[in-house]
Image (cartoon, rainbow, N blue to C red):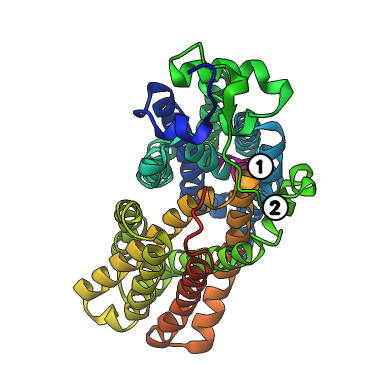
């Protein structure tokens, strides 16, 4: 075996899932879990910030927007970095950055400082999630990749739930600052664990002389056969890259083969997060304005992330058996229909809960599935950039969605009209995903 060439793809796909691959998924799960924790905790401390600094609603909006803007910047910055210096190193840098940012946020003396430090924290978070998606995808066997990467990404939803529970325990004793201390200590403790236990992607290291020793040690661990020499390992290449692509990973996203797919996937990501943040940001207020108690409005709104987790698992199972573009297109259609029904269903509590449930099932489930799909769409040299920039474009949509929801509600005046309008971008995402599938029909993702 030492004298014959094998590919990285055969090495990953041809063996049972190893302990090392499970370690990668668990550590990446923890990285995205801390992302979810941070998102949740920022929302829960808002009332305390408002009371302490006498903030106006627009100032609270700036606080939330700063974090989203940081996430967007982090996505665009760290994606190419991960394709240059490696996935592991980029994740560790991101985790340290958002850990320091969270600790500094806990000491913010005024709202202006808080906004600036939330931006810094967001930049770190923006690099962690997409790179974790990329690394977990590259260590997952192709046949199990949708379900394994989806399970890893469920760390975000669990982090959301855990963030709320932990914030509720911390705030009575330590106030809002204690929440950010906890949110800063956890990633800084995790960073050395990641450095010691998290392996670099073998796909990334292959062919790079400075990683030769590290790649050989990882090959020995993955194969269980020290006789396999790194020189006998090949990586299946698509033949779609140019020499310029290898120097600038971003160029691969816009070469002749990938250009249209990149733009269509960006449309899908932009529309998905636009709708999700529009719904999640404004649904509680709309329900409260309709006469529902704040507690009940929170309960109904919480169905969005819960059902989204269920939808993600359903889509992952279907994507193993059915064309993933078809699965995700159908998921967007389900989401659009359910969102359109939220307004008319407000007079009936059971129909309302059902509409919100299927909104999250389709929309959030499709977004998680799209993360898995885009991680396999691009070749190795541009994979982290592809994932990060797609999420970055999506986060631009999230900023617009959180800002335009109130404007549309004011203009349209009635939820019965507003929510069908809210649903339109989900239909655009369905069309974009379906068009991508037709354009790349028969061309397997990596």
Dominant secondary structure, magenta: helix
Closer-to-camera residue (185/365): 365
| Left or right: where 291 falls relative to 194 | left
Q: Is residue 125 magenta?
A: yes
What residue is shown with label 2?
252
Q: Secondary structure at mark 1?
A: helix
Q: Residues within 10 Å of mark 2 (few under 14, many from 20)?
A: many
Closer-to-camera residue (227/250): 227
The count of marks equals 2
Q: Is residue 298 magenta?
A: no
Tell whether label 2 touches label 1 (CB within 8 Å): yes
Residue 206: percent from the left, percent from the top? 63, 29
Residue 27: which numbered mark, if any? none
Dividing the picture into quarters, in which one does residue 23 lie?
top left
Question: Residue at 41% of width from left, 69% of height from top?
Answer: 329
| Left or right: where 314 falls relative to 137 | left
Dividing the picture into quarters, in which one does residue 289 lie?
bottom left
Residue 79: percent from the left, percent from the top? 66, 45
Dividing the picture into quarters, in which one does residue 124 lie?
top right
**Residue 323 versus residue 98 in the image, above or below:** below
| Left or right: where 144 falls relative to 439 | left
Question: Residue at 33% of width from left, 65% of height from top?
Answer: 297
Q: Residues within 10 Å of mark 1 (few under 14, many from 20)?
A: many
**Residue 248 versus residue 332 in the image, above or below:** above
What residue is shown with label 1?
381
- Cα–Cα gap, marks 1 and 2: 8 Å
Question: Residue at 78% of width from left, 45% of height from top?
Answer: 243
Residue 234: percent from the left, percent from the top? 58, 31
**Residue 35 versus residue 341 in the image, above or below:** above
Question: Residue at 47% of width from left, 57% of height from top?
Answer: 370
Residue 21: percent from the left, percent from the top? 43, 28
Region rendered in magenta: 121-128
């Amino acid at each position: 075996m030492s004298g014959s060439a094998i590919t990285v793809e055969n090495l990953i796909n041809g063996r049972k899932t190893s302990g090392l691959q499970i370690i990668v998924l668990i550590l990446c799960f923890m990285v995205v879990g801390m992302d979810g924790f941070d998102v949740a905790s920022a929302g829960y401390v808002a009332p305390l910030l408002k009371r302490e600094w006498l903030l106006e609603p627009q100032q609270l909006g700036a606080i939330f927007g700063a974090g989203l803007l940081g996430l967007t910047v982090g996505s665009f910055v760290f994606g190419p970095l991960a394709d240059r210096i490696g996935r592991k190193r980029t994740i560790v840098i991101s985790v340290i950055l958002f850990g320091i940012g969270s600790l500094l946020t806990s000491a913010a003396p005024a709202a202006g400082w808080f906004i600036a430090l939330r931006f810094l924290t967001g930049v770190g978070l923006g690099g962690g999630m997409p790179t974790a998606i990329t690394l977990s995808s590259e260590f997952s066997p192709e046949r199990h990749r949708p379900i394994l990467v989806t399970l890893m990404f469920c760390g975000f939803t669990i982090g959301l739930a855990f963030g709320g529970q932990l914030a509720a325990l911390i705030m009575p004793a330590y106030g809002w600052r204690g929440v950010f201390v906890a949110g800063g200590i956890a990633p800084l403790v995790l960073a050395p664990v990641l450095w010691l236990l998290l392996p670099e992607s073998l796909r990334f290291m292959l062919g790079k002389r400075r990683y030769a020793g590290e790649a050989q040690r990882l090959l020995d661990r993955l194969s269980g056969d020290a006789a396999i020499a790194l020189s006998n390992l090949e990586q299946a290449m698509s033949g779609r890259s140019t020499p310029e692509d290898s120097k600038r990973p971003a160029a691969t996203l816009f070469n002749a083969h990938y250009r249209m797919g990149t733009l269509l996937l960006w449309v899908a990501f932009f529309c998905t997060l636009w709708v999700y943040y529009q719904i999640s940001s404004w649904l509680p207020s709309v329900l409260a304005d309709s006469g529902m108690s704040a507690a009940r409005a929170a309960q109904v709104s919480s169905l969005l992330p819960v059902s989204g987790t269920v939808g993600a698992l359903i889509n992952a199972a279907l994507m193993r058996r059915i064309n993933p573009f078809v699965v995700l297109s159908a998921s967007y259609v389900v989401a659009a229909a359910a969102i359109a029904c939220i307004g008319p269903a407000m007079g009936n509590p059971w129909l309302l809960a059902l509409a919100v449930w299927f909104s999250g099932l389709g929309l959030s489930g499709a977004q998680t599935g799209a993360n898995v799909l885009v991680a396999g769409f691009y070749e190795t040299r541009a994979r982290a950039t592809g994932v990060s920039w797609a999420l970055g474009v999506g986060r631009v949509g999230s900023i617009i969605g959180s800002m335009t929801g109130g404007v549309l509600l004011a203009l349209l005046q009635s939820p019965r009209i507003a929510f069908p309008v809210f649903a339109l971008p989900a239909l655009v995402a369905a069309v974009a995903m379906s068009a991508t599938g037709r354009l790349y029909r028969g061309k397997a993702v990596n």
